[in-house]
Amino acid sequence: MTGKPLRCDKVWTGARLATMSAASPLPYGAIEDGIVAARDGRIVWAGPRSEAPAFDPAETIDCGRRWITPGLIDCHTHLVYGGDRAHEFELRLQGASYEEIARAGGGILSTVKATRAASEAELFASADRRLAALMAEGVTTVEIKSGYGLEMDAELKQLAVARRLGRERPVTVRTTFLGAHAVPPEFKGRSGDYADLVAGPMLDAVAAQGLADAVDVFCEGIAFSPDETARVFAAARARGLAIKIHAEQLSNLGGARLAAEMGALSADHLEYLDEAGVIAMAKAGTVAVILPGAFYFLRETQRPPIDLLRRHGVPIALATDANPGSSPLTSPLLVMNMACTLFRLTPEEALAGLTRHAAQALGLQDQIGTLEAGKACDLAIWDIERPAELAYRIGFNPLHARIRNGQ
Ligand code: DI6
Ligand code: FE
């Protein structure tokens, strides 16, 4: 250790680091005997002890050789909603399909009814419990979508609750306006008219109130066509909002390609994605967000084209898709396990999917997602011997501590 001490307020020592840095040639960007130093909530230094400068921290934390990873990032959730869909689960077990239930007015629309009827306080309380489950497994950033209001006031209510969670809980919340999630009953058979309402007055209000960081559309036979999707995206781009898409979940409508060509941050689900879509995503730098919870819960058999995504260098992120209908899942660790068992990701790819690549799916790659100087000091400290354990265990939580903005 040489030179003037580096100014910082906290230092974590005696740790093994999975930096997840893209620049590292080592698996997990691993460092055996590592140090992380933070000042004012940001990482000022992360690396091996042998190369560390001198520090003068107010507080030093010895990690006892535990592993530190970047705080986990759940980049696709529908955390704020009313009611539940346990009964629909029973119907599906008796043979009804997800699409049949949706077409009969259940599915998403039953959650819409419950969400419209719920007060802000009720929505906050139920989402808060789900958020606590995510945080208990090391999540420090979460994306939350609207999409269960499907009318102006109820959509704004969902987004306001999501923003409030971010203010009142020690977690970073990014919000996404998903007004085009389903066609509301008032517009039955007139999806185009509803898409225009979303792209016009609803987006205007959302943007004016600063309630959303991005705009998402469910592009699918039971939801919105590529043409309607493009209209919503054009309106979002005109208002300076990022775009994301639910695409190729149940069929291939070319939604991922469309979104990529319009500059989307991510395309999500992707079970039915074809090579043209993969190439368009690679060219645009659009992240592939895969959601094994929905694949598992709907008992899908068509897997997303992981090999094609790898071959074309498309970054793969993972998320819970926490929602009441297709993925009532609030465990990022189980998502890692499912991505490995169901989709044959490696444990390292799975961890990148909940850190570096998830940050990119939110457009936050300069701020979070790796242990590197300049980024937020968002850490998860684990009682494990090797990082692959995070994907290996089922239903066991080895989190030792969760640090967000250095706290
Ligand atoms: N795809 C999904 O899997 C969720 N939304 C979407 O666009 C399902 C939402 C629900 O069933 O409530
Ligand atoms: Fe979703």
Image (tube, rainbow, N blue to C red):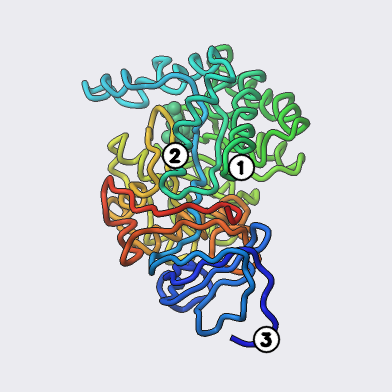
For the residue pair 309 and 407, the one nearer the viewer reads as: 407
Question: Identity of the amino acid at label 1?
Answer: Arg
- Compared with 10, 288 (above or below) is above
Mark 3 Cβ and ligand 2 under 8 Å apart: no
Q: Is residue 272 visible?
A: no
Mark 2 in CB contact with mark 1 (< 8 angstroms)? no
Q: Is residue 214 visible?
A: yes
Q: Whole-percent x and y of residue 153?
A: 66, 18
Given the current orientation, which residue lies at the most extreme front position?
A: 58
Crowd around label 2: few <14 · some 14–19 · many ≥20 (10 Å): many
Q: Which residue is mark 1?
A: 174
| Circle 2 or circle 1, nearest the eye | 1
Task: Classify residue 323 by image quadrant.
Answer: top left
Q: Residue at x 66, y 34 (%)?
A: 232
In the picture provided, is 387 more to the left or to the right than 149?
left
The dot on residue 3 is 3
For the residue pair 212 and 126, the one nearer the viewer reads as: 126
In the picture provided, is 301 more to the left or to the right than 160?
left
| Circle 3 or circle 2, nearest the eye | 3
Question: Identity of the amino acid at label 2?
Answer: Asp
Q: Whole-percent x and y of residue 54?
A: 62, 80
Crowd around label 3: few <14 · some 14–19 · many ≥20 (10 Å): few
Mark 2 Cβ and ligand 2 under 8 Å apart: yes
Which of the two discs, 2 and 1, labels the residue nearer the N terminus?
A: 1
Which of the two discs, 1 and 3, labels the residue nearer the N terminus?
A: 3
Q: Residue at x 23, y 24 (%)?
A: 93
Q: Residue at x 63, y 26 (%)?
A: 195
Question: Which quarter of the image is occupied by the N terminus?
Answer: bottom right
Crowd around label 1: few <14 · some 14–19 · many ≥20 (10 Å): many
Q: Whole-percent x and y of residue 254?
A: 51, 44
Q: Which residue is mark 2?
A: 321
